[in-house]
Image (spheres, grey):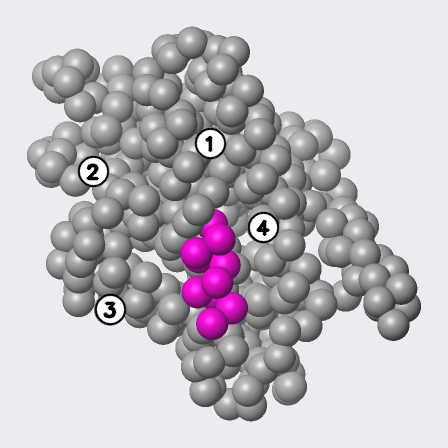
Amino acid sequence: MASEVSPSIFGRVRLALTPEPTPVLLRTGIAVLIDVLVVFAVVRTALVFAGHGEVGLTHAVLPAVFGGIFGFLGSLGGSARSGLARALLLSLASFPLTLLAIAVRDVPIAAGLALAAVAAGAGFLAWHGEPLATLGSVLLYMFFLPLVFGAGSGVPIGYLALGFAVMVVCSVVLRGIVALLPRHRRAARVKATDEATHTRRFALVAQPQLSRLRRTTLRSAIGLGIGAFVMALTRRHDAVWVLMTLIALIPPALPLTIDRLLQRLAGTAVAMVLLTAVDALVPPGPWRLLALAPGIVITIAYMRRSYTLSVMGISLVAVLAYAQVQAPLGEALLFRGMDTLIGAAIAIAVTLIIPVGRRPEPVWGR
């Protein structure tokens, strides 16, 4: 019996880790990397001219960088006019979302309720298909990153406002440059789901997909809300990785599948091997920043093509950024590996135990 079952399981695993038949969005990944570098450099320069000292300067710059990533990413695709409008509006929206994240981060009940509400809002938008599903994901991550990493906490409001104002200008200018490129060389839009764009505005997706999305949204809001509550209550920095695993495995718009779980674990494992090599071969310091650039590009370029590689990329970026390039990576790697397993276990428990509609069963994605 074992010989009959094993080939089927191995075949399933191999299929789960096989890339999807979608293009690699390399130009999009490079465009986002350029956006990060430009926003970081310009905002940093603006804050220095405004009188901010070297101490805590990077911490003051990061909130605008996080907002700029998703404001710019969400602006890609479509016409030049709509792209510029989205760059402006999304970049502006990142400021109040960051302020909300800063305000609730150390208050357990507020942190849990806020993340649950933002996740529910993202899910509500996903019920209406693309492009609203992508809009919901962009807004969710604009709030999520400052919440889990504490970006902007303790930074005077004047410096925060200046950083975001400069970022908004940079995002609009960079989106304008993208619009000037030949159409076949422009960075493509990244979609949060595989759904086709709806032609009717704000029309709900058809059943039975709508019922599945509603259950997924509620489970995601509950799971992420509990995770944010625990993170704020314990104030343990390693809880960041648990929450990051949860949002990757139980987002509001996508159901948890065995494929996605395996891809998450495989991508994290590969990243840990690469980071161990970086820790052993590259001395702490600015040279480690070189690993951030390919990590950002891979994360975006393979977001739809290969979730495994995308997870590997974001893990490289997250661990290096969180541990800081001047510090040893050993502790961050240990917590990252352990808490990915913990987050995966919690995600499975949330999916199987929370009685929302029909009790689900673990399924393969394809």
The residue stretch that appears in magenta: 340-349
**Of pointers 3 and 2, the one earlier in the residue sequence:** 3
Crowd class of label 3 (few under 14; some 14 to 19; many from 20; radius 10 Å):
some
Q: Nearer the viewer, residue 62 or 80?
A: 62
Q: Are marks 1 and 2 in contact (CB under 8 Å)?
A: no
Residue 134 image point, x, y percent: 52, 58
Q: Is disc 3 placed on a helix, strand or loop?
A: helix
What residue type is disc 2 on?
A: Gly
Question: What is the C-alpha distance between the residues marked 4 and 2?
Answer: 28 Å
Q: Is disc 4 placed on a helix, strand or loop?
A: helix
Q: Is disc 1 placed on a helix, strand or loop?
A: helix
For label 2, the residue is: 152
Residue 242 image point, x, y percent: 39, 53
Judge left or right: residue 14 versus residue 282.
right
For label 3, the residue is: 113
Q: Nearer the viewer, residue 176 or 71?
A: 71
Which mark is nearer the camera, 4 or 1? 4
**Of pointers 4 and 1, the one earlier in the residue sequence:** 4
Crowd class of label 2 (few under 14; some 14 to 19; many from 20; radius 10 Å):
many
Crowd class of label 4 (few under 14; some 14 to 19; many from 20; radius 10 Å):
many
Which mark is nearer the camera, 1 or 2? 1
**Of pointers 3 and 4, the one earlier in the residue sequence:** 3
Please tell me the numbered disc located at residue 264.
Answer: 4
**Residue 342 located within the stretch drawn in magenta:** yes
For label 1, the residue is: 317
